[in-house]
Image (cartoon, rainbow, N blue to C red):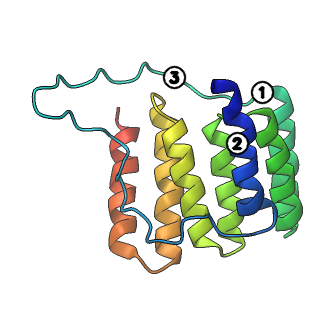
Amino acid sequence: MRWLLPPLLAAALAGCTLFGGTPPHAGPTAPPGAGTAAQPGPGEAPSAPPPQRSFRLSPAASALVNQAHRHSGAGDYDQAAATLERALRIEPDNPLVWIELGRVRLAERDGAQADALGRKALTLAAGDPAAQASSWHLIADSLRARGRNQEAEDAERRAGSLATR
């Protein structure tokens, strides 16, 4: 079943990012932190925290991210996004690439898409406080861009609490 996940994820992303579409869920965005930590039910023991991790980019993905930075710096956000989507095909489970794509979407003034990408990165960043903090910073920036300042402050606090770990 696990081998089905990458093709399904790619198919889901095709409609969301390749053509500038919006995510399939049109409902309200979950508040910061929603769904990020499961609470034990009655009579259940708390689950152990995920093992510490530290995400890094592979040389191929790193080269593509650097290329995307050059495109973004020149204001060519479409090409930057296309380049990052190539990096996602190489490393679909790396939250750092999702964060980079979220930054491009934010630069395109697509705060909702940036928020969704930040939350995707957050789910992938389990066990890596630095990647989680970067995800929360992206989420905060996307919320702020949409005038949701109180939620943005909450997201920034979450990022700050991760940085002190």
Indicate the secondary structure of the residue bearing disc 1: loop
* Sequence-wise first label, 1 or 2: 2
Q: Decide: marks 1, 2 in contact (CB < 8 A)?
A: no
Residue under label 1: 58
Q: How many angstroms separate mark 3 from mark 2 (CA)? A: 25 Å
Residue under label 3: 53
Query: Would residue 34 appear left or right of 127 to someone viewing this image?
Result: left
Query: Would residue 55 appear left or right of 91 to someone viewing this image?
Result: left
Q: How many angstroms separate mark 1 from mark 2 (CA)? A: 23 Å
Residue under label 2: 8
Q: Dividing the image into 4 quarters, which one contains the N terminus?
A: top right
What is the total number of numbered labels drawn onto the structure image?
3
Residue 126 position in % (x across, y down): 46, 32
Which quadrant of the view contains residue 10?
top right
Residue 102 position in % (x across, y down): 65, 57
- Which amino acid type is shown beneath numbered disc 2? Leu
Q: How many angstroms separate mark 1 from mark 3 (CA)? A: 15 Å
Query: Would residue 39 appear left or right of 129 to someone viewing this image?
Result: left
- Which amino acid type is shown beneath numbered disc 1? Ser
| Observer able to see residue 92 | no
- 150 or 23, which lies in front? 23
